[in-house]
Image (cartoon, rainbow, N blue to C red):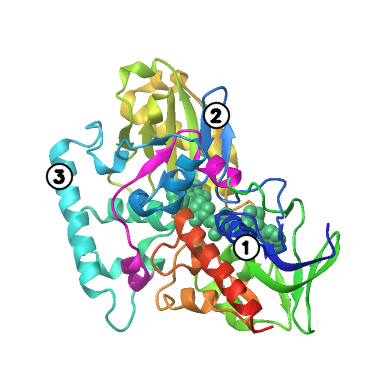
Amino acid sequence: MAQEAEVVIVGGGAAGIAAGRRLREAGIDCLLLEARARLGGRAWTVDAGPDFPLDLGCGWLHSADRNPWTKIAMALGLTVDRTPPPWGRRAMPIGFPLAEQASFEAAIEDFRARLDAASEAEPDVAAAQFLDPGSRWNDLINAIGTYVSGAELDRVSARDYGRYEDSGVNWRVVEGYGMAIATYAAGVPVALNTPVHRIDHGGRRLRIETPDGTMTADAVIVTVPSNVLAEEGLRFTPALPDKVDAAAGLPLGLADKLFLSLSEADEFEKEGRLFGRPDRRGTATFHLRPFGRPLIEVYFGGNLATELEANGDAAFFDFAKSELVALFGSGFARRIAPVHIHRWKADPFARGSYSYALPGKAECRAVLAAPVEDRLFFAGEACSRHDYSTAHGAYLTGIAAAEQAIAARHTR
Ligand SMILES: Cc1cc2nc3c(=O)[nH]c(=O)nc-3n(C[C@H](O)[C@H](O)[C@H](O)COP(=O)(O)OP(=O)(O)OC[C@H]3O[C@@H](n4cnc5c(N)ncnc54)[C@H](O)[C@@H]3O)c2cc1C
């Protein structure tokens, strides 16, 4: 590892890679320090056989028509698939008749309209406050909330939830979103397997401490997940209690994906969608035959995902199997087998899936993003006001932090 660089970037996810690319374009001597043995962070494509790339983290180019990763993926020669997402269409009418789905859709639209109309009002409250107490769809609205935020609606700031901006266009990268993001790091100097434990900003130069030794730099861009900052997996000397508090106000919710193989897959339409139990808070959602492949992608969020993580990988499969068997009969069990799961909460360099704000904590995003002494800069999805929780939000904060670091050069 080099002993010094003008700018050190801590963390090689979407934000750190975007920052690195921007700094290199500006001809700045930079080094990206990544704790893992790979780049991409919560963007991670694994291969489940030829032509079967699986995104264990981000999979959807949300707001794809204005998402910078869309253009980047195309420029890298990757294939952007524009099939609309399953959640934009009706679910399969198994265990959830179409008339019931229409009733549910009306209920969730009303919930969102009430929330959007009042989310900037004082005081900020939990998103759950906008549920209609008499509605029979509250459990399923909450379950959807756990896929969106990774947390139950009673933990989520309505203000922050209302600030999320979504163009409604969702596409995918056939070869993998994680693959696109990691590939984009080409040309950025990187040290893998290099966790940063401490950043000492007490002296004239910043000192960045790792197990391989200490580096010095004029500026650092910190892009680690909010939970890593809140739990002080990375510390500052002198301490930065405002940053730790802001990160604690923006915990990572939990969403985990399980991929199942599916035999005799042709029986099902491509890109189908199913809910395990539309009458339960803790239910999985199933995406059948993504890209037409003989697979089922199962999504778990919030408390359900947390409970299953505590019981190990097999607990996810057992839960998914029990819901599928209840829908299709006991013979279905022999048609599915687990292919991949990643437990994001148990992952020490993520500690969760994506950030949400606790009630009253929406402004923490700006506090977390604010530079310190014009030489410690912060990026990562949790720093984004309108695109938090996403890979494109992470990208935009990485570019913003790199621009701040470039502007600060002139004052040194
Ligand atoms: C299951 C799941 C599904 C998702 N689906 C979508 C989706 O469809 N669309 C979408 O846009 N987003 C989705 N996301 C969210 C998206 O993946 C993240 O918002 C985005 O990748 C975060 O990028 P980042 O750079 O902010 O953080 P990260 O990707 O977490 O990058 C931070 C990096 O810092 C490293 N690090 C941590 N600690 C240290 C340390 N001490 N020293 C050095 N390095 C350290 C980490 O290893 C990591 O590489 C999903 C996430 C998950 C988990």
Q: Can the viewer see residue 311?
A: no
Disc 1 is placed on an element classified as helix
For marks 3 and 1, give the one nearer the viewer.
Answer: 1
Q: Which residue is mark 1?
A: 23
Q: Nearer the viewer, residue 80 or 246?
A: 80
Q: CA distance from mark 3 to mark 1?
A: 49 Å
Q: Amino acid at mark 3?
A: Ala
| Location of the C terminus (image quadrant) | bottom right
Is residue 195 covered in magenta?
Answer: no
Q: Which residue is mark 2?
A: 339
For marks 1 and 2, give the one nearer the viewer.
Answer: 1
Vertical arrangement, residue 92 with respect to residue 280, above or below? above
Q: Is residue 164 left or right of residue 196?
A: left
Closer to the chain start, of discs 1 and 2, is 1
| Location of the N terminus (image quadrant) | bottom right
Q: Residue 88 appears in which quarter of the rendering?
A: top left
Vertical arrangement, residue 196 with respect to residue 218, above or below? above
Q: Amino acid at mark 1?
A: Leu
Q: Position of residue 90 (x, y in %)?
A: 22, 38
Q: Which residue is mark 3?
A: 102
Closer to the chain start, of discs 3 and 1, is 1
Q: Nearer the viewer, residue 294 or 405?
A: 405
Q: Residue lying furthest top in this view?
A: 264
Magenta segment: 157-183
Q: Position of residue 231 (x, y in %)?
A: 64, 69
Tag shown at residue 61: none
Disc 3 is placed on an element classified as helix
